[in-house]
Image: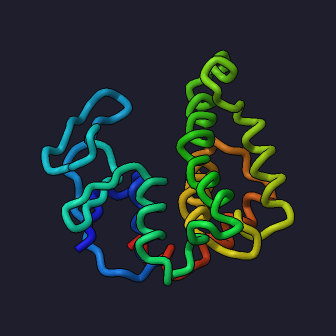
Amino acid sequence: MITLHHLPNSRSSTIVWLLEELAVPYQTRTVSNIRRADGSGGRDPQNPHPHGKVPALTDDGHVVFETSAIALYLTDKFPQAGLAPTVGAPLRGEYVSWLAYRSGVLEPAFIARRLNINHVFGMMGWAPPEEVEDVLNTHLANRPYFLGDRFSAADIVLGGGINLMIQFKLMTETPVLAAYCARITDRPAYRTSLQ
């Protein structure tokens, strides 16, 4: 049985949405404690994530952690759901690139914006938030989803992040991004994941 170590209203909600889209059996185990931004909290000893964060997933004795890795693992395990190009397929490279974009580019850019940190972009290899917004708006201007006409786990992982960043006023809501977020959140699995 797939078990998602989960804390509601956190990054692990992305994986709940993905599991609902995959329509496979799973269970969630609510993590009792995580470290908070204000320094409070601590580790839940039952959480297998090496840093005590969420999401973490266990499946048949194996542990997978970090949102993009879990998405890749699950979409490879359940290819019949059609949420990812298979290994060797033409869009596979683009798919894995967009999966990695959330934690590698999107989150650092907008956390830096929130904390008013501007000097690290060149030094850390991060992109400035305005540049990230331009890339996303340009990419989605003439296509409904990150992989074109095909909804994929990239839309759950990266699109879910965009949706949250706009809700928390960390990203600029443009007509392109507003329409995209409306499209991806108008799905039964997304609505079920919120319950």
Image height check: is 195 above or below 9?
below
Quadrant in which the N terminus is drawn: bottom left
Q: Position of residue 121 (x, y in %)?
A: 67, 23
Kindly identify the residue that appears in the image at 56 percent across and 74 percent down: 83
Q: Where is residue 132 in the image (x, y as percent from the top left)?
A: 73, 41
Q: Nearer the viewer, residue 85 or 53?
A: 85
Kindly identify the residue that appears in the image at 33 percent across and 55 percent down: 64
Kindly identify the residue that appears in the image at 75 percent across and 75 percent down: 149
Image height check: is 108 above or below 135?
above
Image height check: is 16 above or below 22?
above
Asked where in the image residue 151 lies, by quadrant, the reply is bottom right
Q: Is residue 46 left or right of residue 65?
A: left
Q: Where is residue 88 in the image (x, y as percent from the top left)?
A: 62, 67
Residue 17 in sight in this render: no
Q: Which of 64 and 20 is in front in this view?
A: 64
Kindly identify the residue that appears in the image at 68 percent across and 72 percent down: 183
